[in-house]
C-alpha cells in the first residue's frame, strides 16, 4: 500500500497516542498492584501466608532459551509447576481465538489476519516467557493464604497485571502493520482483545 504524506502523519499520530495510552495504563496497573508480582524473569516465593519474600528464578538455559516445565524438573522451594489450563499455551490460545474473532468481525482480509495473528502470537509468547507467567500464576494461586479473600485478591491482581502485559504485547505486535490505518478505536479494541482474554482466563481461578 502506497502512503501519502497526510496518511503517514495521521498514522504516526494514531500510533503515538495509542502507545502513550497503553504505557500509561501499564504503569498505573503496576503501581497500583496490591501484590508485587515479579518482573524480569523472576518469581515471588511465599515465605508464609502473611509474609512474602522475593527470589530470582531463572527460566532460561545457558543459551538464553526459555525452559518450559517438564515432569521431574527441580524448582526452588515454594515455586509450583504450571497448572493445567493456565499455561502459556492456554493463555496464548485464549488471546489468539478472541483476536481472530475480532478481526473476522471487522472483515479484515484473511491473509492480513494470518499475518497479524503470527505477529501477535510471537509477541505474547515472548512477553509470557520473559515474566515466567505460568509459574507465577501457579505459585500465587497455590501458596497458603490466611483467608479466601486474600487468595481472591491475588487472583484479581494477577488478572490485571498479566492482562496488561498481554495488552502491551498486542500493541507492540502491530508495529508496521497496515491495520494501524484502521484508526484509534480499532487499535484500542485490538489491544483489549488480548488483554481481556488473558485476564478473563485467570479470573476463572476464582471459581475453583
Image (tube, rainbow, N blue to C red):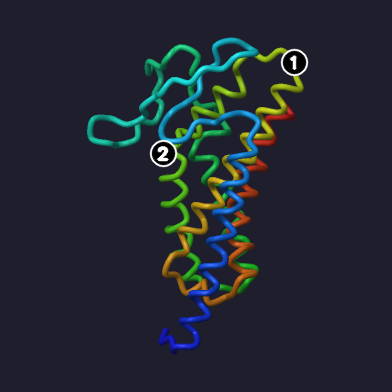
Please identify the quadrant where the C terminus is shown. top right
Q: Quadrant of the N terminus?
A: bottom left
Q: Is residue 127 left or right of residue 186?
A: left
- Separation of disc 1 and disc 2 at Cα? 31 Å
113 left or right, relative to 49? left
Q: Which residue is mark 2?
A: 130
- Give above or below for 113 relative to 144: below
Q: As drawn, is 120 to the left or to the right of 148?
A: left
The residue depicted at 46 percent of the width and 82 percent of the height is: 8
Residue at the image position 57 percent from the left and 48 percent from the top: 26
Looking at the rendered structure, which numbered label has been put on residue 147?
1
Considering only order in the chain, which callout, 2 or 1, is on the residue closer to the N terminus? 2
Residue in the foreground of this view, choosing between 93 and 150: 150
Look at 49% across and 88% down and name the residue there. 6
Above or below residue 164? Residue 170 is: below
* SS assignment at label 2: helix
On residue 15, the disc is none
Can you tell which quarter of the image residue 145 is in? top right
Callout 1: few (<14), some (14-19), or many (20+) C-alpha neighbours within 10 Å?
few
Residue 45 percent across, percent down from the top left: 51, 18
In percent of width and height, residue 65 lies at 30, 36
Q: Secondary structure at mark 1?
A: loop
Q: At x 62% / y 69%, what residue is drawn?
A: 186
Above or below, 80 against 159 in this view is: above
Label 2 packing within 10 angstroms: few (<14), some (14-19), many (20+): some
Amino acid at each position: 500500500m502506497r502512503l501519502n504524506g497526510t496518511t503517514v502523519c495521521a498514522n504516526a499520530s494514531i500510533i503515538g497516542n495509542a502507545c502513550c495510552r497503553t504505557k500509561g495504563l501499564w504503569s498505573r496497573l503496576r503501581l497500583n498492584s496490591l501484590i508485587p508480582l515479579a518482573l524480569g524473569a523472576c518469581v515471588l516465593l511465599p515465605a508464609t501466608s502473611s509474609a512474602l519474600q522475593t527470589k530470582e528464578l531463572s527460566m532460561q538455559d545457558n543459551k538464553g532459551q526459555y525452559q518450559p516445565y517438564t515432569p521431574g524438573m527441580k524448582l526452588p522451594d515454594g515455586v509450583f509447576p504450571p497448572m493445567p489450563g493456565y499455561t502459556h499455551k492456554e493463555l496464548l490460545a485464549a488471546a489468539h481465538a478472541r483476536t481472530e474473532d475480532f478481526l473476522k468481525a471487522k472483515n479484515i482480509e484473511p491473509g492480513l489476519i494470518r499475518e497479524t495473528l503470527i505477529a501477535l502470537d510471537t509477541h505474547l509468547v515472548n512477553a509470557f516467557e520473559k515474566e515466567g507467567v505460568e509459574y507465577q500464576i501457579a505459585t500465587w494461586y497455590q501458596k497458603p493464604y490466611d483467608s479466601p479473600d486474600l487468595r481472591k485478591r491475588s487472583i484479581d491482581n494477577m488478572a490485571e497485571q498479566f492482562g496488561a502485559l498481554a495488552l502491551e504485547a498486542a500493541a507492540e505486535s502491530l508495529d508496521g502493520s497496515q491495520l494501524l490505518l484502521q484508526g484509534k478505536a480499532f487499535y484500542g479494541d485490538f489491544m483489549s482483545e488480548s488483554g481481556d482474554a488473558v485476564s478473563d482466563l485467570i479470573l476463572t481461578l476464582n471459581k475453583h
